[in-house]
C-alpha cells in the first residue's frame, strides 16, 4: 500500500510541468516550491511527555495545474524531537513522510490550511523497566491530521503556525495499542514561485 501511495505522489508531482502552458502569464516564473524550517513542541505520550525539536518541510503546489487542483499541494515533512528528555532516559522521537495539503487562498497575506500525512515514525534509545534490556527502538507507520495558517511576513517569506495530531500503532506493549503524539510547530518558509502564491 505504501508503494502505491509513493508511486501516485511521484506521478502527481512530476506531472505538474505538463500543465504549465495553461497558467496565466502573470503566474509563470519561479518554481511552485515552498521550503520551511521550524521549532516543534510535542506531547509524545511516552515517558518524556513534552519534548521539543526541529521540523523541516517542503510543499510542491499545483497552481499551474487545472483550476480544480488550485490550492492543493504535496507536503514532505521531517521532524526530530530530542530535547526535554527526563533524567535517566534517552528518548528520541521522529517522523518522516508526506501527503496532501489544501490551502484556502481567499486572503492575500493570510492562508489557513489542512493536511493529512503518512509517516514513518521512529522512537529510539528508550530506557524503561517495562521493556527488554536489548530494546533500542522501533519504526512504525503513523498517520497525522493537522492544520494551521501561514502569514506573509515579507514578499516570499511566510510565517507558519502548525498543529498536528498523530496516530502511531505500536506493538511493544500489546498489538492493539496506539500512541497519539500531538503538538505545534512555529517556523518560517520561503516560497520560490515568483508570485509568492
Image: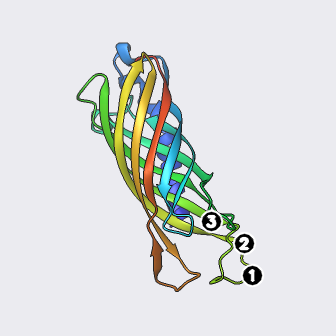
- Tell me the tag on residue 136: 2
Tell me the distance, in whole angstroms, between the alpha carbons under discs 3 and 2: 8 Å
- Provide the secondary structure element on which disc 3 rests: strand
Query: Which residue is located at x 69 percent, y 68 percent?
Result: 88
Query: Residue lying furthest left in this view?
Result: 106
Q: Which residue is mark 1?
A: 133
- Label 3 crowd bin: few (<14), some (14–19), many (20+), radius 10 Å: some
Tell me the distance, in whole angstroms, between the alpha carbons under discs 3 and 1: 15 Å
Residue 151 placement: quadrant = top left
- Provide the secondary structure element on which disc 2 rests: loop
Q: Which residue is mark 3?
A: 123
Q: Nearer the viewer, residue 103 or 82?
A: 82
Q: Position of residue 156 (x, y in %)?
A: 45, 19
Tell me the distance, in whole angstroms, between the alpha carbons under discs 1 and 2: 8 Å
Q: Nearer the viewer, residue 64 or 123?
A: 123
Q: Nearer the viewer, residue 63 or 78?
A: 78
Amino acid at each position: 500500500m505504501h508503494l502505491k501511495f509513493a508511486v501516485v505522489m511521484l506521478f502527481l508531482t512530476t506531472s505538474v510541468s505538463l500543465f504549465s502552458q495553461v497558467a496565466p502569464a502573470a503566474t509563470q516564473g519561479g518554481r511552485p516550491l515552498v521550503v520551511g524550517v521550524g521549532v516543534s513542541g510535542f506531547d509524545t505520550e511516552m515517558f518524556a511527555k513534552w519534548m521539543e525539536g526541529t521540523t523541516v518541510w517542503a510543499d510542491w503546489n499545483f497552481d499551474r495545474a487545472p483550476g480544480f487542483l488550485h490550492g492543493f499541494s504535496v507536503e514532505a515533512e521531517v521532524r526530530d524531537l530530542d530535547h526535554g528528555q527526563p533524567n535517566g532516559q534517552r528518548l528520541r522521537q521522529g517522523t518522516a513522510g508526506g501527503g496532501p495539503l489544501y490551502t484556502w487562498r481567499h486572503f492575500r497575506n493570510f492562508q489557513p490550511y489542512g493536511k493529512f500525512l503518512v509517516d514513518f515514525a521512529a522512537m529510539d534509545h528508550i530506557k524503561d523497566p517495562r521493556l527488554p534490556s536489548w530494546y533500542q527502538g522501533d519504526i512504525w507507520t503513523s498517520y497525522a491530521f493537522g492544520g494551521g495558517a501561514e502569514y506573509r511576513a515579507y514578499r516570499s517569506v511566510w510565517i507558519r503556525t502548525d498543529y498536528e495530531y498523530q496516530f502511531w500503532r505500536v506493538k511493544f506493549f500489546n498489538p492493539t495499542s496506539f500512541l497519539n503524539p500531538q503538538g505545534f510547530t512555529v517556523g518560517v518558509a520561503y516560497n520560490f514561485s515568483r508570485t509568492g502564491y
